[in-house]
Image (cartoon, helix red, strand yellow):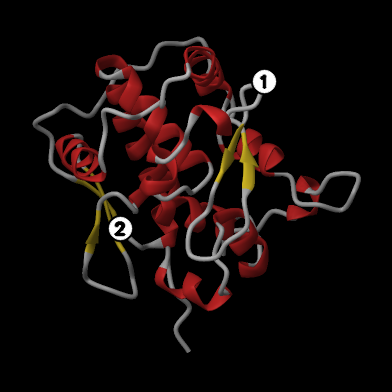
Amino acid sequence: MEKKIDYSQFVNSNGVLSVKKLNDFLYPKPKTKKVKSVLSMNARATTLSVNRTDLARRVRAVNTAIQEVKNKDRLLYYCILLMYRHALRVSEVLNIMPNDILLNGSVIIHSLKGSSKKNIYVDEVACYLLKCKNNNTTPFERYNRWYIYRQLKKYNISYISSSSSKLSITHAFRHLKIEELRSIGLTDIDIAEITGHKNVKNLQYYGYSKKK
């Protein structure tokens, strides 16, 4: 059985779970060695299956796809990073306005469905967001959820939940993020705080589900 990591190491001095510490652990800075891409545009769909034993393989696969996006569409890459790193809904990213962007490059996300606001930060996206703030432009104004949906399909990014046979496209990163957080030992209460789920029970529809 895979040993879980004590997630208390991700709690700051105030006893609050630090999303930044979690992301630093889950997404360490890449080594300088150049890695040849193994995923082409004509490759088979990279469906993120629900078997926990191959979570690392699926994370590598989706990160390879993300790198392909980075090389071809930088704005879409920024959108994906925000969704993946902080388990954001696509609508939450698309609704970011200039006034939501703070002077340090972090951004206030107006969570949906009764959830509280949250302050997030992604280093790779901060400069772009600050530029949008200075120019008073909406970061992703040229995108809509259907465009994102088509682009994710184009790059073969999808997810099949264990609780449903339905294929998730725009929610794929949200599913995978939740599965990653569970794999390092976080409770669903902690995960709900990060993902903005008001009802913890809704997490049963994400990632792998614990069947009684």
Question: In the image, residue 28 lies at what x, y percent?
Answer: 59, 29
Image height of 209 relative to 107, above or below = below
SS category of the residue bearing label 1 = loop
The residue positioned 16% from the left and 40% from the top of the image is 150
The residue lying toward the viewer, choosing from 50 and 54, is 50
The residue positioned 48% from the left and 58% from the top of the image is 112
Say left or right for 145 vs 94.
Answer: left
Image height of 145 relative to 34, above or below = below
Q: CA distance from mark 2 to mark 1?
A: 39 Å
The residue positioned 61% from the left and 60% from the top of the image is 191
Disc 2 packing (10 Å; few <14; some 14–19; many ≥20): some
| Quarter of the image where one finds residue 134 | top right
Question: In the image, residue 49 lies at what x, y percent?
Answer: 30, 58
The residue lying toward the viewer, choosing from 84 and 96, is 96
Residue 47: mark? none
Residue 103: mark? 1
Q: How many marks?
A: 2
Say left or right for 207 vs 20.
Answer: left
| Amino acid type of the residue that numbered disc 2 sits on in the rendered structure | Ser
Which residue sits furthest left? 42
Question: In the image, residue 4 lies at what x, y percent?
Answer: 65, 58
Say left or right for 78 vs 72.
Answer: right
The residue positioned 47% from the left and 47% from the top of the image is 88
| Amino acid type of the residue that numbered disc 1 sits on in the rendered structure | Leu
Q: Which residue is mark 2?
A: 49
Question: In the image, residue 152 lies at what x, y percent?
Answer: 23, 39
